[in-house]
Amino acid sequence: DNISIGITEEEHQSEQLQATTLHDIVSVFDTCGVVALTNVYSSSQIDEAARAQAEHFYEQSARSKQTSAIGRRGVEVKRRGGVLRQEVICPLDKPFTDLTSSSMVLQTARQILQSTNVELDTFSYIQSEPGSSLQSWH
């Protein structure tokens, strides 16, 4: 696909993105409005985050069904556009902080935003249920 940029083993070892990689990241982002980094996380990091994400989603989904204030600050599952798609905000605890504190991700955000003053303070994703309409990357 045209939006993915792969991180090399050398970049992983040095925890520093090459100038050409940063240039490619910005070019894709400027053209497409989104960029997907590949090879940023190890398989074990992905597996650990997936387990934690599933556990967190089911806990928060159950909690949201017990409250009438869906979307109120403090309720972690926020429904948008319909009940088939919802934003799930993960806690800023391990393993999620391991994902948001990645030097590759932070370098990318700093380069795209052209600022060294970048902090990732929220980690969320959209949970789409079967039957939800297709969405473009955004």
Image (cartoon, rainbow, N blue to C red):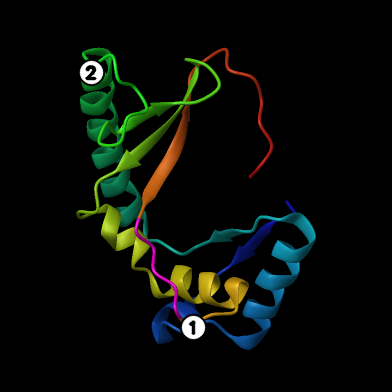
Tag nearer the camera, 2 or 1: 2
Query: Is residue 119 on the magenta stretch?
Result: yes
The span picked out in magenta is 117-121
Q: Quadrant of residue 90?
A: top left
Residue 43, percent from left and from top: 36, 54
**Rendered residue at 26%/39% (across/down):** 51
Task: Tell me the kind of residue under disc 2.
Answer: Ala
In the rendered view, tell whether residue 109 sits above or below residue 59. below
Mark 2 neighbour density, 10 Å: few (under 14) some (14–19) many (20 or more): few
Label 2 to label 1: alpha-carbon separation: 43 Å
Q: Mark 2 vs mark 1: which is more N-terminal?
A: 1
Q: Quick one: 16 or 110, which is closer to the camera? A: 110
Name the quarter where the C terminus is drawn. top right
**Rendered residue at 23%/16% (across/down):** 67
Task: Tell me the kind of residue under disc 1.
Answer: Glu
Q: Quadrant of residue 2?
A: bottom right
Left or right, 119 with respect to 11, comes to left
Say which element carries label 2: helix
**Rendered residue at 65%/43% (across/down):** 137
Looking at the rendered structure, which numbered label has been put on residue 10?
1
What secondary structure predominates along the stretch shown in magenta? loop
All told, the count of numbered labels is 2
Mark 1 neighbour density, 10 Å: few (under 14) some (14–19) many (20 or more): few
Residue 82, percent from left and from top: 52, 16
Left or right, 21 with respect to 41, comes to right
Residue 92, percent from left and from top: 24, 53
Looking at the rendered structure, which numbered label has been put on residue 62?
2
**Rendered residue at 34%/22% (across/down):** 70
Looking at the rendered structure, which numbered label has been put on residue 37?
none
Q: Quadrant of residue 132?
A: top right
Query: Is residue 109 on the magenta stretch?
Result: no
Task: Name the residue at the right extreme.
Answer: 31
